Amino acid sequence: MSQIENRLLELGYSLPAAPAAAGNYLPYRISGQQLYLSGVLPVLDGQLSHTGKVGQDVSEEEAYIAAKNCVLSALANIKAALGSLDRVNQVLLVNGFVNGVEGFSNSPQVINGASDFLVELFGDAGRHARAAVSVSGLPKNVPVELQITLEFK
C-alpha cells in the first residue's frame, strides 16, 4: 500500500473503486508527465453522497464534505492511471464547480473542502492553482464537481 493510501487510512478514509466514464470520454488522459482528470462527482460506497443545490438543498458545510468526496473519486482515477498515488509529484490545478442557487458567491469556501484535503494528503505537493465557480446545474444534480490536473513522476 502506498504512503498516500496509508495517510488516507490515518485520516479515516479508504480509496474507492475508480468510477467508470459515464459517456463517450476518458476518465483521464496523460500527456508527458501530466495527468488530466475528467470531472468527478461526490461518490461514497458507489452512491452519490450529496445531491441538490448549495444554499437550497445542501448547506455550505455539506458541500465542503461533498468536495472532499470528489477528491476521493479523483484519487481512485489517479491510482488507476498511475498505478500508485505515490507517483504524484504535485497537484497543478483544481477546477471546482458548485451547483449553487442564483447569486451564490461562496463557491471558494465550498471548494476549500477539496483544496484542504489535497494539502492534508500531499503536503506542499497538494497546493495548487484553482478556480471555484458557481454554476446553475451539474450532472445528476450534485452540489460539486471537480477537474484536477497534476504532474507525476
Image: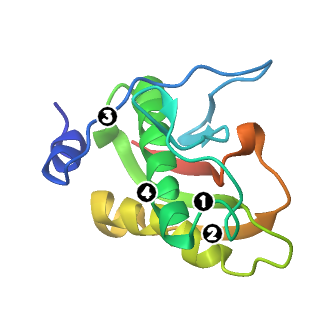
Q: Amino acid at mark 3?
A: Leu
For the residues labelled 1 and 2, the Cα–Cα distance comes to 5 Å
- Mark 3 = which residue? 15
User: Which callout, 2 or 4, points to the residue nearer the camera?
Assistant: 2
**Camera-side residue of 119 and 62:** 62
Callout 3: 10 Å neighbours few (<14), some, many (20+)?
some
Q: Quadrant of residue 28?
A: top right
| Amino acid found under the numbered disc labelled 2 | Arg
The residue singled out by tag 2 in the image is 130
Q: Are marks 1 and 2 in contact (CB under 8 Å)?
A: yes
Left or right placement of residue 150 versus residue 56 in this view: left
**Position of the C terminus by quadrant:** top left
How many angstroms separate mark 4 from mark 3 (CA)? 19 Å
- Sequence-wise, which precedes: disc 4 or disc 3? 3
Q: Nearer the viewer, residue 1 or 110?
A: 110
Which x, y percent locates residue 60? 56, 71
Amino acid tagged 1: Val
Please give the name of the residue rendered at 63% of the width and 69% of the height, measured from the top-left corner.
Answer: 130
Could you tell which of marks 2 and 4 lies nearer the N-terminus? 4
* Residue drawn at the location 52% of the way across and 57% of the way down: 67
Q: Secondary structure at mark 1?
A: strand
Give percent across and percent down for residue 15.
31, 34
Residue 5, image x, y percentages: 23, 40
